[in-house]
Amino acid sequence: MEELIYLDNAATSWPKPDNVYEFMIDFYKACGVNPGRSGFDKAIEAGNILEDTRKRLTAFFGGDVDAPERLCFSYNATDALNLLIQGALKPGDHVVTTNVEHNSVIRPINHLVRDHQVEATYVPFDTNGFVDPGDIASAIRPNTRLVIVNHGSNVLGTVQPVADIGRLCKEKDVVFAIDASQTAGMVPIDMQAMNIDVLAFTGHKSLMGSTGIGGLCIRKHVELAQTRSGGTGVRSAYPFHLPEYPYRMEFGTPNMVGIASLWAGQEFIDQSGGVEKIHAGEMKLANKLVAGFHAIDGVTTYCCDSMDNHLATVTMNVEGLEAGDVGIMLDVDFSIATRTGLHCAPLVHQQLGLVDIHGGVRFAAGPFNTEAHIDAAIEAVTEIAERARNMKRVSAK
Ligand SMILES: Cc1ncc(COP(=O)(O)O)c(C=O)c1O
């Protein structure tokens, strides 16, 4: 079988680093027991990895290192964002967000708008794919309780100016949260310096962990209401869910293998020279891809004219073809894995006018892609665009 060229790293990073696979297996074999529930050695060892991972990630995101309990684990970013949005807003509140958001922000907000008298404002992005911090500030009202912004677009690849937005939110005393699903492990983040009050992350993308793990990093001055309850393993006689962190935002047995994968993912990032170095390597590939696409007749890219403040994510279309058809050709004829469609970000496609052609084709490089993969992608798209032109000629006859 032809080797698969995997360019779908914005969906999930693959493969994972070898040290991540190895640590997950070794950890689960050695101490895959329930942490924090029992006092035997293995439970304590599992608890140590849990607490150490909280500390590492808190430092990694520039959170409050003296309060690692405010790094709370969830199933994924979607779960974390639901906890955050439902915990921050109550009837009568207003939230400001953007057209760059993923459905994991849009849908929880829309449910609150439809069913719980919450109001929402969606701020559009400019022609280059960036949200103007001034537009966010202008949308803030006296009843605005939350501003939430997708740090890195999973469609356009643009990285929003969160430090500027954070400064304006601080001036207006509104909680500022980011969806760091695409940027955590890819772009340096310093919550304190950037005035980010809450950060939601997922483990399976650039943090190089497994699926099924994500979380929230919540600054000390922020309180989120509890929206679920259940077992915590401590103070079992208390009739309600514990209000203190991390229990306030954690429910039931944690995904310890996922947490171990995040611990090992941090090792990988450190050993690879850090986030900036990994990002620079991926951007070299993305720049090459964009230059290649721009030279092909009939190919349109979106918000890639400048690759500054950008992820290694490039969305494009081939004139005369539906995005899904291009994806099938890439897969079947060239063994190249991409993602097509609306990418769970319908407002991006609505603003770009791409809904009628069913979105775009997304290429996303990761740390294990090579220049040869990019050359193959450019060659494949060149051939597909040629096919589209031939089809047009035939149908014009
Ligand atoms: C910007 C963004 N937010 C949220 C998510 C949801 O992440 P998860 O599937 O881990 O819940 C994704 C996943 O693609 C994403 O790209």
Image: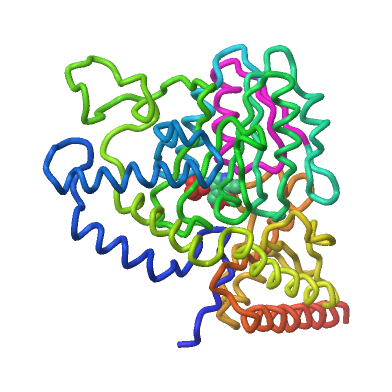
The residue lying toward the viewer, choosing from 131 and 2, is: 131
Q: Please state the horizontal and vertical placement of residue 218, each as a whole percent of the image.
A: 50, 31
Q: Please state the horizontal and vertical placement of residue 49, each as a whole percent of the image.
A: 30, 48
Residue 49 lies within the magenta run: no
- The quadrant of the rendering that contains the N terminus is bottom left
Image mark count: 0
The residue lying toward the viewer, choosing from 204 and 278, is: 278
Q: Residue at x 59, y 63 (%)?
A: 339
- The quadrant of the rendering that contains the C terminus is bottom right
Residue 108 lies within the magenta run: yes
The residue lying toward the viewer, choosing from 258 and 139, is: 258
Q: Residue furthest bottom?
A: 1
Q: Residue furthest left?
A: 40
Looking at the image, residue 292 sits to the left or right of residue 153; the answer is: right
Q: Residue at x 39, y 54 (%)?
A: 263
Looking at the image, residue 6 sits to the left or right of residue 346; the answer is: left
* Quadrant in which residue 38 is drawn: top left
The color scheme shown is: rainbow
Q: Please state the horizontal and vertical placement of residue 155, each as a whole percent of the image.
A: 67, 54
Looking at the image, residue 125 sits to the left or right of residue 100; the answer is: right
- The magenta span reads 95-123
Instruction: In the rendered view, tell whether residue 149 sits above or below residue 96.
Output: below
Q: Residue furthest front?
A: 66
* Quadrant in which residue 302 is drawn: bottom right
Looking at the image, residue 203 sits to the left or right of residue 318; the answer is: left
Instruction: In the rendered view, tell whether residue 74 sits above or below residue 233.
Output: below
Q: Residue at x 59, y 58 (%)?
A: 275
